[in-house]
Amino acid sequence: MKPIQVGLLGIGTVGSGVFHVLARNQEEIRRRAGRGIEIAMVADLDVARAQSVVGAGVQVVSDARAVIANPEIDIVIELIGGYGIAKQLVLEAIAAGKHVVTANKALLAVHGTEIFKAAAEKGVVVAYEAAVAGGIPIIKALREGLAANQIQWVAGIINGTTNFILSEMRDKGLDFDVVLKEAQRLGYAEADPTFDIEGVDAAHKATIMSAIAFGIPVQFDKAHVEGITKLGAADIRYAEQLGYRIKLLGITKRTDKGVELRVHPALVPAKRLIANVEGAMNAVLVQGDAVGATLYYGKGAGSEPTASAVIADLVDITRLIEADPTHRVPPLAFQNHTLREAGQDLPILPMTEVVTSYYLRLRVADQAGVLAKVTGILAGAGISIDAMLQREADEVGGEGSTQTDLIILTHDTREGTMNDAMAQMQQLPTVLAPITRIRKEELN
Ligand code: HSE
C-alpha cells in the first residue's frame, strides 16, 4: 500500500526530530501503522536550512499553503506555534480535507472549540498528543486508558522550564532572578520566557486536560494563571523545613459546584513522588474513581521526545484513515454531541470559590501580641491553622534584628475567605511587608 504522505509546516527543533525519528524507526513504525509514513513535503521560511535537514529527496517550499494545496498530502503537521498564521493554516488544512497533527497547545486551549468543530464537520482528525507534556502520552491515557473512570482531578508539573528553575532555586538556595539568567544561558529558558515563567504555557496544557477529563469545552479565558516570578529562596527553604517542596502545578478538579482550573506554585508534601520530579522533567498525576491515582512521568519538551508524541498521532491516524469518522476516538474524549456547553452544569469556578489550604509568610515586628492578632484574624474568619514556624529574629534579619518571619500552614478554606483574612492581616501595623501566600496541595 502507498505510504501515507505527510506535509510538515515548520521544521525547527521538533520538526527535525519528527523527520529523524521517522527515518530511523521507519520499519517498526510501518509494522505498527500498517502502512509506511513519509514526510513528502516541508514548508519553512528558511528553505536552505530546511533542505539541509531533510536532504534532496524531500520537496521544501517557503509557502505553507503549497503543502495544504498538494492533493497527495494526507496529513499536515503544524509545528509553527501561536494563534496567528498557525490557526489560519490549521483551518485551511481541515477545509482541504487533510488530517492535522499539532503540538500547538496555545492554539487548542484558546481556539480548540472552533477547530474541533471544523474538523468534525469535515470528517477529519485533529490530533495533539504533543501539545501536553511533550513525550508523555497523557492525552492517550486520559482519553482512552482511563475511559472507565470518573476523573476526579488532574495535577501536573507541565512546564519544564519552571520546574528546572524551581529545582535550581532549591538545590542552590538562589533567588528566582539569578536562576532565570542561568537557565537562559544554558538554553533551558527562552530569551523571552514570559509564557513559561508566568504560568501561561502550563495553563494552556491544564485547559486542554480539563476538557478531556470532564467533557467540557476548552476555556482558557477562565483559568487562574499565576507563575513563579514572585517566589523567593526563603519560601522554598521554609517549605522544605515544613516537609514540602514548591512546584508549579497545573490543576483541574471536579467539585460539586463546578470545575477548578488553575495554575500556580504550590507546596506539595516532599514524600509524594511528584514532589521529587526535578529539573526539566514533567509529570502528571490523575485521580480516577475506579483506578485511584496514576502518575505519568517523562520529558515534556525537546526534539525527539516531542517527535515521539507527534509520530504516535501519525500512527493513530494512519490506522484509522479509512474508518468511518464515528469510529474514531473523539478529540475531547467524550462524543461531540455529549460535550457540555461552556458554563452548563459544570462551570469553571472563579478562584474565590476554590477550596484549598495555604502557606502564609508574614514579615512581622518581633513584639508581644503580634502572633495573637494574626491568629485572631484567622480564627475570626473560621480558618484553622495546621502548623506554624517562627525562627529567632537574629536568624532571619541578622544580629539585633527586630523583625522576623511568621510561617503559617492552614487547613482547607475558601480562597475568598482567605483573601478577606489576608486583607485584614495586611492592615496590622506590625505586619511589615506584603504577605506571601502560596497554596498547598496534599495530592492524596
Ligand atoms: N516551554 C515548555 C516547557 C515546553 O518549558 O515545558 C513546550 O511546551
Image (spheres, rainbow, N blue to C red):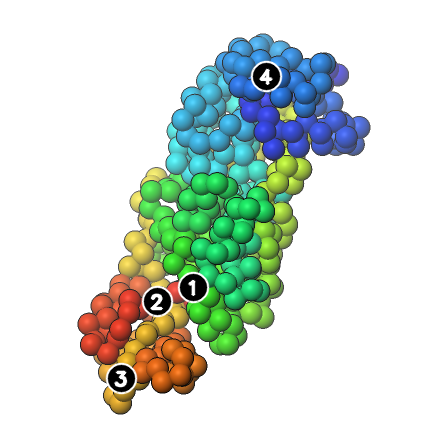
Crowdedness near tag 2: few (<14), some (14–19) or many (≥20) residues, C-alpha within 10 Å: some
Q: Position of residue 278 (x, y in %)?
A: 60, 58
Image coordinates for residue 261, horizontal then vertical, percent: 39, 51
Residue 389 pos. (x, y %): 42, 81
| Quadrant of res 371 | bottom left
Q: Is mark 1 within 8 Å of ligand 1?
A: no
Q: CA distance from mark 3 to mark 2?
A: 17 Å
Please give the name of the residue rendered at 36% of the width and 85% of the height, measured from the top-left corner: 400
Label drawn at residue 47? 4
Query: Which residue corresponds to mark 1?
Result: 232
Q: Residue at image x 53%, y 11%?
A: 66
The vertical placement of 30 against 233, above or below, is above
- In the picture, the disc for residue 436 is 2
Tell me which corner region of the image, top left, top right, bottom left or bottom right, holds residue 415.
bottom left
State which tag comes first along the sequence, 4 or 3: 4
* Some atom of ligand 1 lies within 8 Å of the CB belonging to the residue at label 2: no
SS class, disc 2 = strand
